[in-house]
Image (cartoon, rainbow, N blue to C red):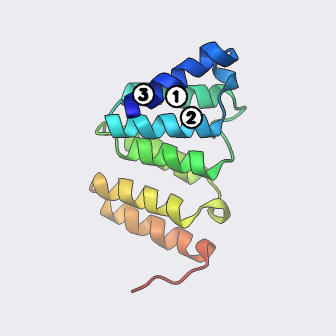
Amino acid sequence: HYTSALALYDGVDALLGGAHAKDDTAHMLALKACTSLGLVERGKQIHAQCLQNSTNSTPTNNIELLTTLIHFYGHSSHAHDIETAITIFDAIPNECKTVITVGAMMNALCKHDMDDECIRVFQNVLPALQFEPDV
């Protein structure tokens, strides 16, 4: 189904007239398909399309799309992609981060054996999330 989802995503260009016709939801779903299929370069192309629609290095203020990008880069087997995930995460103000966003970043850091960084992320955002951990 993921391959079909990417084909549909690509078909939107022809149907609606270019990459700018796609919204954050379309980008997010295509990135999730790329993550599941392990299509790192294709996901990076989609990220580039998000950046083309933006005036700065953070593609959107849509926290769901930013979380999807963190998940995508964090699950890439390319070592330098975790740095991109960290950059995206760090660009999000703490008060805008959700439990899901923090969880995606922590999961990515653990996947790359960056346990100390994972703990640092948790400690830095805990006050902004305004919840108590279940420990």
Question: Would you identify the image quadrant in which residue 131 lies?
Answer: bottom right
Residue beneath the point at 69% across and 23% down:
20
Q: Position of residue 35 (x, y in %)?
A: 38, 39
Q: Position of residue 3 (x, y in %)?
A: 38, 28
Q: Position of residue 14 (x, y in %)?
A: 61, 13
Q: Quadrant of the C terminus?
A: bottom left
* Left or right: 74, with 29 as reference point: left
Q: Which structural element holds mark 1? A: helix
Mark 1 to mark 2 CA distance (whole Å): 7 Å
Residue 12 or residue 67, whichever sits in front: 12
Please tell me which of labels 2 and 3 falls first in the chain. 3
Question: Would you identify the image quadrant in which residue 38 lies?
Answer: top left
Question: Would you identify the image quadrant in which residue 109 lies?
Answer: bottom left
Instruction: Kindly indicate whether the residue at mark 3 contacts the one at mark 1 (C-beta within 8 angstroms).
Output: no
Residue beneath the point at 46% across and 22% down:
7
Up the image or down, 91 lies above or below 29; here it is below
Which residue is labeled 1 in the image? 46
Which residue is labeled 3 in the image? 4
Please tell me which of labels 1 and 3 falls first in the chain. 3
Q: Amino acid at mark 2?
A: His
Please tell me which of labels 1 and 2 falls first in the chain. 2
Could you classify mark 1 by the number of other residues whose Cα lies within 10 Å: few (under 14), some (14-19), or many (20 or more)? many
Instruction: Kindly indicate whether the residue at mark 2 contacts the one at mark 1 (C-beta within 8 angstroms).
Output: yes
Circle on res. 27: 2
Q: Residue furthest bottom?
A: 135
Up the image or down, 133 lies above or below 120; here it is below
Q: Amino acid at mark 1?
A: Ile
* Left or right: 94, with 38 as reference point: right
Q: Which structural element holds mark 2? A: helix
Q: Quadrant of the N terminus?
A: top left
Up the image or down, 134 lies above or below 5; here it is below
